Amino acid sequence: MHWLYFSTFAVVGYEAGSGYRPLIEAYVLGDKLLDTKFQDAVIDAIVERRYAKDLDCKYTQPSNDTINWLYSHTTSSAPIRQLFVDMLADFRRPPPAVTVFKKETSQEFLLQLIAKLYERRATDKTPLKASDYYRQPTDPSKRTQPEDKSK
């Protein structure tokens, strides 16, 4: 409902590990409806969620089930996949999802994550920018992103 009035998604504090799946489902809906503005608003909300703390004042990351759902419901070229790879590669300490990967975890995701981790070892860390994952490129001066508070 918030989207209809404001063209944004309300991101609030969640319990640890939750909050990403409904946003991914919304992104997939936007893909089916061919609504790239809707998908871009979902990307904004996911990045905002990434930098929001849960009820225990900790940053959250998606669960294995969420990652698997994402990879089974999106195409290999979907920018949202790269966003989630970048999100997990961006954490300073290994996120719980990384330490408890199961056989069922998407192999494609794991390979992309490993490649991103190697790439990031050699470069400086920069905060995620939602517009890097938009379906349609936009004017970068129009949107601002929250600072990376996990540093």
Image (tube, rainbow, N blue to C red):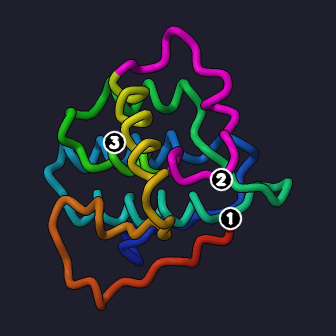
Residue at 47% x, 69% y is 126
- Marker disc for residue 92: 2
Mark before the other along the chain sequence, 3 or 2? 3
Task: Specify whether residue 34 is painted magenta.
Answer: no
Q: Is residue 88 above or below residue 53?
A: above
What residue range appears in magenta? 87-107
The nearer-to-camera label among 1 and 3 is 1
Marks 2 and 1 close (CB-CB < 8 Å): yes
Q: For the view shown, which residue lies furthest in the front direction? A: 122
Amino acid type, callout 3: Arg
Labels 1 & 3 near each other (Cβ < 8 A): no
Foreground residue among 47 and 85: 85
| Side of 40 where 22 appears, left or right | right
Pointer 1 residue: 150
Instruction: Check the picture and name the quadrant holding the N terminus.
Output: bottom left
Q: Residue 51: which numbered mark, if any?
A: none
> 30 above or below 64?
below
**Contact, mark 3 vs mark 2 (Cβ under 8 Å):** no
Q: Which residue is mark 3?
A: 81
* Residue pictured at 42% horizontal, 71% vertical: 8
Sequence-first disc among 1 and 3? 3
Does 118 sit above or below residue 102? below
Residue 110 image-quadrant placement = top left
Q: Position of residue 12 (x, y in %)?
A: 66, 63
